[in-house]
Image: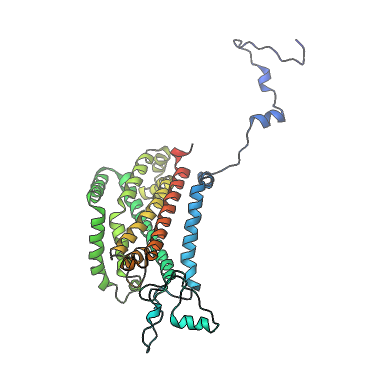
Amino acid sequence: MDNGSKRRFNPFSMHVNVDDFIPATDEEKEYIVKMRPSTTFFRDGVKRLCKNKVALISFIVIVLITLSAIIIPYFWPYSYEQMLGVTPGKPVDPSYNNLQPFTYGKTEQSIIDEGGSVFPHVFGTDSSGRDYFIRVVYGTRISLAVGFFASLIVLVIGIVVGSISGYIGGKVDLIIMRIVDIIYSLPDMLMVILLAAVLRQTIGNALEGTVLEKIGSNIISLFIVFGVLYWVSMARLIRGQILSLREQEYVLAAKATGAGPAWIIRHHLIPNCISVVIISTALQIPNAIFTESFLSFVGLGVNAPMPSLGSLAADALNGISSYPYRLIIPAIVISLIVLSLNLFGDGLRDAFDPKLKS
């Protein structure tokens, strides 16, 4: 055998193949070893989310709508409660009521005829002479705020109750799950309407003279309704995750070191099911917004003159034959918000759910 040729090796021989211990060349290392930068679960999820164009566009739409609802009222010359044509000590000017888009009242038109400038009414005015565009913008802000804060309340209650039920188990889990089953058996919309109506009457007097009076009893009652009824889905979801995670080795190791149940839940169990929590919360927000819009539509939502998208749609029913756009505009905004949030929630689920990682 030549020195430059490789030795023949019998696979059934007991001798060690020396060729296996020859250092690999740089070319072989580059071919065999595929270097990959270190990453995390969150980074991988964000990369997958960015590849989902539908979810990314939905997220951009949500951000644009949210920023518009926050920023526009600061520089818009009209406020949501300002009745145009109403001047103290003077008779009401009816020419400002029910203006068509980009039309003006008598006083404004005279200013324009004299060479002045008047900020246009983009969506016209309502039956009370209030600028409709700023009312839609402010109504969007209220609906988004109610949706986000209500989902936050549901998240907190669901995580606390679901974690306790899943980790402790036994009679505690049995009692909590029976309460959840009872709440699930109740008709949702009927209970929401009844609770909202009762709470509006009982809370209204208690809020007088407090900081919460400006927010209104109806908004507070909405938050209470979500806290009482809508936490059950989140609690069951967290309970299922905790039941599967509490049998893992790292939980047993934490118990062996003397860690208490609260510490284990905060530092081990909840962080390991955070992806499910994010996904569920993202899908809960459009449900909260839709419920708020529905309650405002039937008159159990925000207090007048504060608008929401549901109350604007309800007010538009009076003149739907003459001014159909007043109903179409808030309906389109509600549909766009709910659709974008649902699509973004689906994108989060596809990106962060480990079962759908492939």
Q: Is residue 71 above or below residue 176?
A: below
Residue at (50, 60) in percent of width and height: 64
Instruction: Classify the position of the N terminus by image quarter.
Output: top right
Q: Is residue 243 above or below residue 30?
A: below
Image quarter for residue 20?
top right
Residue at (69, 28) in percent of width and height: 28
Residue 271 appears anywhere in the view: no
Residue 190: x and y, percent? 23, 56
Residue 139: x and y, percent? 40, 66
Which of the pair 274/217 is nearer the observer? 217
Report the side of 297 relative to 116 (left or right).
Answer: left
Report the side of 131 relative to 39 (left or right).
Answer: left
Q: Is residue 118 above or below residue 13?
A: below
Residue at (37, 67) in percent of width and height: 323
Residue 63 appears anywhere in the view: yes
Residue at (29, 75) in percent of width and height: 208
Q: How is the image coloured?
A: rainbow
Which of the pair 348/308 is nearer the observer? 308
